[in-house]
Amino acid sequence: MADHQTYYVPEQSKWPIVATVGLGVTLYGAAAIMVNGNQGESTTGSWIMFWIGALIMAYMLFGWFGSVIRESRAGLYSDQMDRSFRWGMSWFIFSEVMFFAAFFGALFYVRMFVVPWLGGEGDKGSSNMLWEGFQASWPLVSNPNPEAYPGPKEVIGPWGLPLINTILLVTSSFTVTIAHHALKAGHRAKVKLWLGATIALAVVFMFVQGYEYMHAYQDLDLTLQSGIYGSTFFMLTGFHGAHVMLGTLMLAIMLVRIIKGHFTADNHFGFEAAAWYWHFVDVVWLGLFVFVYVL
């Protein structure tokens, strides 16, 4: 008769309820900020609501993940539970892939279909409906009324700051892999070194990205309102930047856990999940670099 592993069933938890309240307050605050800002009203109360929700979410994440860590270190999780964590992280990353696929799909649709149609190509060509002097080329930086809808002076070239950021993220992918192999070999000092290097590269990336945004807004007049190019540029790079921040936070938590003596050569899925996520962030950036900056 085959042996069956036990499956750990946790006790009742308050964290899902806390997460629901925190997320609801955060989203309400964010919506109120946008509505009040567009109507020219004060957003002070909305920002307070937003940050209260954010603090509740931070409290929830710290407490919920803390419970999972304590249960794992107490030996309550079986191989079956480990597989469930791996499947959960895999589906989460897949959902993120689909999230970015939607934005890349929008960019592809605009560049390959909409712009040619606006130039008069194909059965849906409609150049006769646009303003005089319209040129169907990408990026679209000219608008019918430059005073009301100012376009950018120029776009950001790929071989300056974007190339630097590409080198930073590709390098960080190698450093986190070295740290992972060091953990499996039991070389904890090496793990700390290379994981710390990965976090440092990520922080530099975010600073460079922030500087690029300042340059775009202040010097190039490239903003989120600069037509379809500005919208797709900032939506893609902005959401990616948010994912870099999240990935950096995950890696920083892994470093703290390594310093505290957590993980073994055979039991370290928390670290492995963070590494998976970081590789995903790196691959998305390579797509951004090619399709947003280069082509």
Image (tube, rainbow, N blue to C red):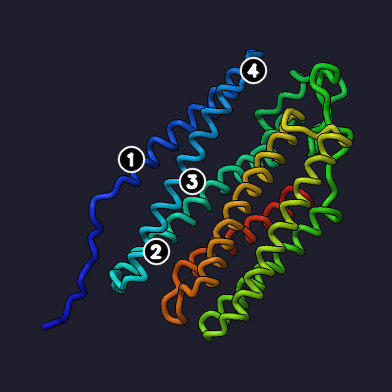
The tag earlier along the polypeptide, 4 or 2, is: 4
Residues at marks 4 and 3, CA–CA distance in whole angstroms = 28 Å
Residues at marks 1 and 4, CA–CA distance in whole angstroms = 32 Å
Q: Is residue 202 visible?
A: yes
Whole-percent x and y of residue 282?
64, 61
Amino acid type, mark 3: Ala
Residue ID for mark 1:
17
Whole-percent x and y of residue 207?
76, 51
The foreground one among 233 and 61 is 61
Whole-percent x and y of residue 247?
58, 57
Residue at 49% in and 31% down = 27
Amino acid type, mark 1: Ile
Q: How dense is the environment of label 2, judged by Cα within 10 Å: few (below 14), some, or many (20 and up)?
A: some
> Height in image: 273 above or below 179?
above
Amino acid type, mark 4: Asn
Residue ID for mark 4:
38
Of marks 1 and 4, the one in the foreground: 1
The foreground one among 230 and 133 is 230
The tag earlier along the polypeptide, 2 or 3, is: 3
Mark 4–mark 2 CB contact (< 8 Å)? no
The foreground one among 133 and 63 is 63
Residues at marks 2 and 1, CA–CA distance in whole angstroms = 20 Å
Q: Quadrant of the N terminus?
A: bottom left
- How many numbered circles does the render carry? 4
Residue at 20% in and 71% down = 6
The label number, if any, that marks residue 69 in the structure image: 2
The tag earlier along the polypeptide, 1 or 4, is: 1
